[in-house]
Image (cartoon, rainbow, N blue to C red):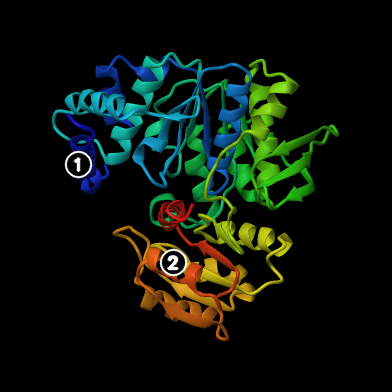
């Protein structure tokens, strides 16, 4: 099977009916020799921050000398990004070969797109001799395909807010209960700073829950180089190669997870790993001559609040900016726009490359309600909107591309052609 054939076979499962429960995935992996049990795992769930926390964990573990697998979702440019070993995405040949094995172990075609990818990830990490793997849940936790692991080194919930309510529930308590499903008996369970009601739910699932309520504090920010210096509660200074007001909380949680796991990681590995973290589309600022493009995958109200905090602290907040906005129709768009509305002076509505995308004309109506004084432009194609901004001499020197990770991926693809 060629890589193109593999992608086509995988895409055909996008429409597969979701069947709640892990029995199918567990039975499938058993037919493959239970690869998910061959590599110790860190498991991370959360409404926001889980990807950044996973990226930090993987970078630090690599710096400590552990051969490290990382499984994240969604991808920005290529599906191979989701599955990496020591920072290298899975190769096309390995991806195709392992997907063939996964498909053969699913003869009646019951597994979904995400479940098949999860199978490929577990197989790849086991076959690659990984000493540890870092797993980001796709959605929720209790019924997520990654939750077939039996005994993680540590499991953590980064944050809890409203997203995917039709699947996870419409109250914070219900959402918390779904995410608490990744906690396992006698395994370290941790969480970031959460609403008290949510903590109560998590603690019922894990009575020895470790709350990490003190984020590492930002000491200084190098906006041009995309990094910040953080101070831990013990007074140690670390340079983190990620921007964002909430990254100090993610770093603190990652540190607590490693400490709780008992793995040996030196202070030198922490310094090196944090300085080498790569996690695109999280307040990623790209410079093109006199213009700056900020790309952020924020797509729910909590992420919008974090984005607004970071934007207000940035050197670009005082300048005119063009916001390029595209969202999916199943998101809380009014809630997303609320914290950003004071900053919206010029907004271009686009359509993210997803079947679930909201049409730009409909999005413009919602933006008009949230920011009635903003200048609105409808431009269906993200690449056209970005290129028009870059070419126009009178356009604002700063553009902010937000609202969807699918849009962020499209923006990165377009911007690579400019370099």
Residue 99 spot, x, y in % from top left: 25, 28
User: Residue 75, how many percent across, how many down?
Assistant: 41, 44
Q: Residue at x 43, y 50 (%)?
A: 168
Q: At 26% across and 24% down in the image, what residue appears?
A: 28
Closest to the observer: 327 or 239? 239
Q: Relative to residue 264, is residue 331 depicted above or below?
A: below
Q: Name the residue under label 1.
A: 8
Find residue 387 and name its label: 2
Using the rendered image of the protein, determine whether residue 297 is visible from the camera's viewpoint.
yes
Q: Nearer the viewer, residue 3 or 66?
A: 3
Is 81 displayed left or right of 65 in the figure?
Answer: left
Residue 329 visible to an observer of this rendering: no
Q: What element carries label 1?
A: helix
Drawn side of residue 249 relative to residue 112, left or right? right
Q: Is residue 153 left or right of residue 327?
A: right
Foreground mark, 2 or 1, reads 2
Q: How crowded is mark 1: few (under 14 residues within 10 Å), some or many (20 or more)?
A: few
Q: How far apart are marks 2 and 1 (CA)?
A: 30 Å
Q: In which quarter of the image is residue 215?
A: top right
Picture quarter containing residue 231?
Answer: top right
Which residue is at 30% across, 22% downward? 29
Mark number, residue 126: none
């Amino acid at each position: 099977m060629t890589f193109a054939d593999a992608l086509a076979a995988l895409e055909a499962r996008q429409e597969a009916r979701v069947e709640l429960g892990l029995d199918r995935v567990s039975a499938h992996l058993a037919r493959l020799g239970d690869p998910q049990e061959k590599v110790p795992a860190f498991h991370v769930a959360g409404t926001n921050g889980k990807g950044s926390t996973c990226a930090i964990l993987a970078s630090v573990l690599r710096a400590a000398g552990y051969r490290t697998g990382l499984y994240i979702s969604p991808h920005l440019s290529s599906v191979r990004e989701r599955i990496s070993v020591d920072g290298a995405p899975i190769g096309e040949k390995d991806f195709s070969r392992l997907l063939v094995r996964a498909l053969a172990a699913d003869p009646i075609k019951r597994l979904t797109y995400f479940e098949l990818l999860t199978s490929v990830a577990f197989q790849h990490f086991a076959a690659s001799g990984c000493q540890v793997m870092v797993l980001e849940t796709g959605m929720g936790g209790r019924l997520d395909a990654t939750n077939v692991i039996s005994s993680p080194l540590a499991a953590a919930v980064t944050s809890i807010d409203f997203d995917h309510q039709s699947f996870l529930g419409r109250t914070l308590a219900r959402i918390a209960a779904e995410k608490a499903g990744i906690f396992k008996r006698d395994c370290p369970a941790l969480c970031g700073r959460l609403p008290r009601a949510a903590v109560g739910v998590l603690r019922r699932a894990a009575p020895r829950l470790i709350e990490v309520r003190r984020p590492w504090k930002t000491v200084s920010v190098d906006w041009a180089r995309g990094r910040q210096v953080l101070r831990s509660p013990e007074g140690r200074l670390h340079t983190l190669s990620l921007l964002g007001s909430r990254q100090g909380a993610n770093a603190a949680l990652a540190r607590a997870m490693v400490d709780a796991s008992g793995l040996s990681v030196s202070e030198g590995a922490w310094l090196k790993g944090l300085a080498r973290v790569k996690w695109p589309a999280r307040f990623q600022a790209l410079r093109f001559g006199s213009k700056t493009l900020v790309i952020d995958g924020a797509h729910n109200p909590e992420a919008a609040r974090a984005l607004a905090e970071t934007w207000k602290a940035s050197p670009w907040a005082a300048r005119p900016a063009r916001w390029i906005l595209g969202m999916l129709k199943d998101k809380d768009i009014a809630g997303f726009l609320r914290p950003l509305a004071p900053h919206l002076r010029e907004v271009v509505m686009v359509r993210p490359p997803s079947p679930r995308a909201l049409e730009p004309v409909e999005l413009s109506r919602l933006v008009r309600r949230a920011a009635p004084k903003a200048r609105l432009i409808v431009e269906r194609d993200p690449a056209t909107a970005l290129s028009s901004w870059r070419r126009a001499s009178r356009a604002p020197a700063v553009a902010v591309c937000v609202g969807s990770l699918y849009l962020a991926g499209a923006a990165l693809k377009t911007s690579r052609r400019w370099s």
